[in-house]
Amino acid sequence: MYHKTKGYRIFSVFNTCFLIFLAVLCIIPLIHVLAVSFSAKAAADANLVGLWPVGFSLEAYKKTAANPLFLHSLWVSVLRTVIGTAVTLMITFLAAYALSKENSVFKGRNVYSWLFVFSMIFNGGLVPFYIVIQKLGLINSFWVLVLPGAVNTFLVILMLNFFRGIPKELEEASLIDGAGHFRTLFSIFLPISLPSIATVALFSMVFHWNSWFDGLLYLNNAKDFPLATFLQTVIIQQDMSSMSMNPKEMELISQTTVKAAQIFIGSAPILIVYPFLQKYFVKGMTVGSVKG
């Protein structure tokens, strides 16, 4: 067997070491941010914090929890992620089911498929897209964070390929028993599509949670920003108006530790959700990529 050869064992060891090295590189910055968020003001301002807190303090988290702008932006991001993921899942599920049919069953399937692919490769550009959003009356609306990204062609193709891997006999048996397409979709395809659904859900969640540019572009009021946009204005643009501190707080709290606390809180939800979806995610990516 190939996996018992010396060359394969050497490759396995090298591959494992390389992946561990990459994993460490990815996790070290997060550990550093967490350590800074729990450190005292003097140590954080003097850049003395490494991978362990110096002068343990919870003041940064207390300040963050008392910031109404941060809490509101966190709520907007949670709402956006939940609703946006649900909308994307529904549209992707319905579109992939239809496009997975043969051209003899779904007339014009190839035309619709190419329209999806064309929209993925070409677009009108930022200014025309902004004008469309404005004409639709979505500027300064919560839905401007959800609807423009509701259809993702890559996710449709991923789920489409998964559906093509499902035995046709299951669908034929369902149709013979009198079930329609919607009954077949939700009673047959849905229960056995958990891997692809988890994959699509995870991609959509990460997109909505981390997206900051659309909030900056389409929302004029900082109070309506999602968390990613809020953090971008604080960390990149150095807008400290949302982090105002009185003299007493400035003696105990560093802007560096508050930023670190906000960054870690912003990263935590995806870090918490991913382990529960990982087994489905890996299977969904594998099956969805090899079935044609």
Image: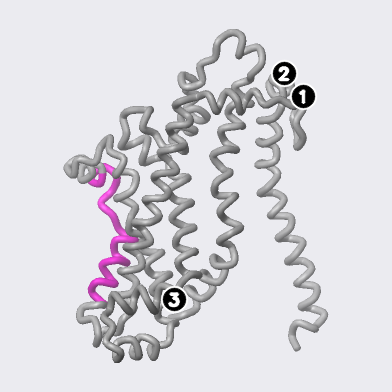
Instruction: Describe residue 286's horizontal placement relative to residue 112 as left or right.
Output: right
Instruction: Describe residue 190's horizontal placement relative to residue 220 as left or right.
Output: right
Instruction: Describe residue 130's horizontal placement relative to residue 37 as left or right.
Output: left
**Precedes in sequence: disc 1 or disc 2:** 2
Q: Answer whether residue 127 is magenta in the image.
A: yes
Could you say whether the residue bearing mark 2 is in a helix, strand or loop? Answer: helix
Marks 1,2: beta carbons within 8 A: yes
Residue under numbered circle 2: 42
**Precedes in sequence: disc 2 or disc 3:** 2
> Mark 2 belongs to which amino acid?
Ala
> Mark 3 belongs to which amino acid?
Phe
CA gap, disc 3 to disc 1? 52 Å
Identify the residue shown where x is 41% and y is 50%. Answer: 82
Above or below — where is 216 with respect to 273?
above
Residue under numbered circle 1: 55
Identify the residue shown where x is 43% and y is 69%. Answer: 158
Residue under numbered circle 3: 162
**Precedes in sequence: disc 3 or disc 1:** 1
Q: Residues within 10 Å of mark 2 (few under 14, many from 20)?
A: some
**Residue lying farthest right?**
6
Range drawn in magenta: 110-129
Instruction: Describe residue 249's horizontal placement relative to residue 86 as left or right.
Output: right
Residue 224 image label:
none
Above or below — where is 211 with respect to 2?
above
Identify the residue shown where x is 44% and y is 51%. Answer: 207
Image quarter hosting the C terminus: bottom left
Q: Residues within 10 Å of mark 1 (few under 14, many from 20)?
A: some
CA gap, disc 2 to disc 3? 54 Å
